[in-house]
Amino acid sequence: MTQDIRILLVGLGNLGRRFCDILVEKGPQLEAEFGLRLPVVGAADSRGSAYDEKGLDPAQLSAIKEAGGTVADYPDVGSATETGGDLVAHRDADILCEASPVNLNQGAEPGLTYIRTALKRGMHVVTPNKGPLVVAYRELHDLAEQHGVQLRFDGTVAGGLPAINLGMRDLRGATVDCIEAVPNLTTGFILELLGDGLSWEEARERAREEGSLEADPSFDLDGWDAAVKLVILVNAVMGIPAKLADVDRTGITGLSQDTVLEARKAGRVYKLLATAERRANGGADLRVAPTMMPTDHLLGRLGRKQMGVVYHTDIYGTIMAAIDEPTPVPSAATMLRDIIDIFVR
């Protein structure tokens, strides 16, 4: 039997648009292999929305965004007055795919409200949006449990790497004593370029050209992104209610090119390393800082567009996973992975 899973997609930036492309590409396979059809019945960006209970064309949504337009431009059913919040609050669907910007400076809004609303209405939620999880991790999980739905967020840490799923599902029964991670692609890319001999200015410009560096690079370069991801890992995998304020955070902007070059000459590399060590009292020490590492370390081997995580456990040994992510496609695909995980048993 084939099951229709009606999707509301909020946020059609880099990830949301590529998620539409993935639905087009993978649609026949999903129906044949899992018996799933995934119609996008509603979509919204910052300038409007569109809703059709019969399903929108994801290829057309992607094309509109690729051309610089808005979902409100969707023929016949687009609206410049119905917001993403209106869509989630009043339109019917089975699941919300929430891919709006992180917006930590604004309390993780509007994504946090979108997720709260969807859970309260009995919709499952999948999201790669880190903001709501770091601001309200426990609250959102409690809401999901109260309303009998699932909240999945595997895409919030290290792009397409299944770091959350690995830690929560495959390490069940273990105590994770320590987490080490290089979860931010941008800083890894820039540090590699500095080690290759590029200046800071040249490295920044190269990162911008390749789409790795945002217009405001501080979220990545000052270590906020890595800290947010570490907090989510500690909550999800270690079961410790960590907050962003618990992280001792240092970014990479204080590293000089000469320092990185000297490390390279000595056979070592710098990575922006995120670590969490469990304390005997049940808490954890959380730290994000540029760290000089030997190249034979599990994370020291990572290349310029790679991310990784290492779990140190009591009974499963030390487990490392890494991803090479030259484009945002794997990050977008995490929403599909989470949907399959919810509906296929």
Image (tube, rainbow, N blue to C red):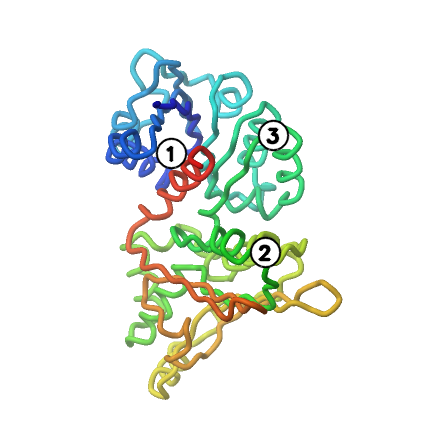
Q: Measure how far apart labels 1 and 2 are at the Cα level.
A: 26 Å
Quadrant into which the C terminus falls: top left
- Looking at the image, is mark 3 or mark 1 earlier in the sequence? 1
Quadrant into which the N terminus falls: top left
Q: Locate residue 25, reporting x and y percent.
A: 24, 35
Seen from the viewer's position, the closer of residues 69 and 285 is 285
* Disc 3 secondary structure class: loop
Please give the label number shown on residue 231: 2
Residue 53 shows in the view: yes
Seen from the viewer's position, the closer of residues 6 and 317 is 317
- Tell me what residue is drawn at x 59 percent, y 48 percent: 134
Q: Is residue 136 above or below residue 23?
A: below
- Looking at the image, is mark 1 or mark 2 earlier in the sequence? 1
Nearer the camera: disc 1 or disc 2 = 2
Three-letter amino acid code at the position of disc 3: Gly
Task: Decide if residue 82 is on the left or right side of residue 203.
Answer: right
- Tell me what residue is drawn at x 26 percent, y 25 percent: 60
Task: Decide if residue 64 is on the left or right side of residue 340.
Answer: left
- Tell me what residue is drawn at x 62 percent, y 26 percent: 120
Three-letter amino acid code at the position of disc 1: Leu
Seen from the viewer's position, the closer of residues 248 and 237 is 237
- Tell me what residue is drawn at x 60 percent, y 31 percent: 116
Q: Which residue is mark 1?
A: 12
Q: Residue 249, located in which quarter of the rendered image? A: bottom right
Q: Which residue is mark 3?
A: 148
Q: Measure how far apart labels 2 and 3 are at the Cα level.
A: 25 Å
Three-letter amino acid code at the position of disc 2: Val
Q: Locate residue 101, reporting x and y percent.
A: 47, 41
Density class for disc 2 (Cα within 10 Å; few <14, some 14-19, many ≥20) is many
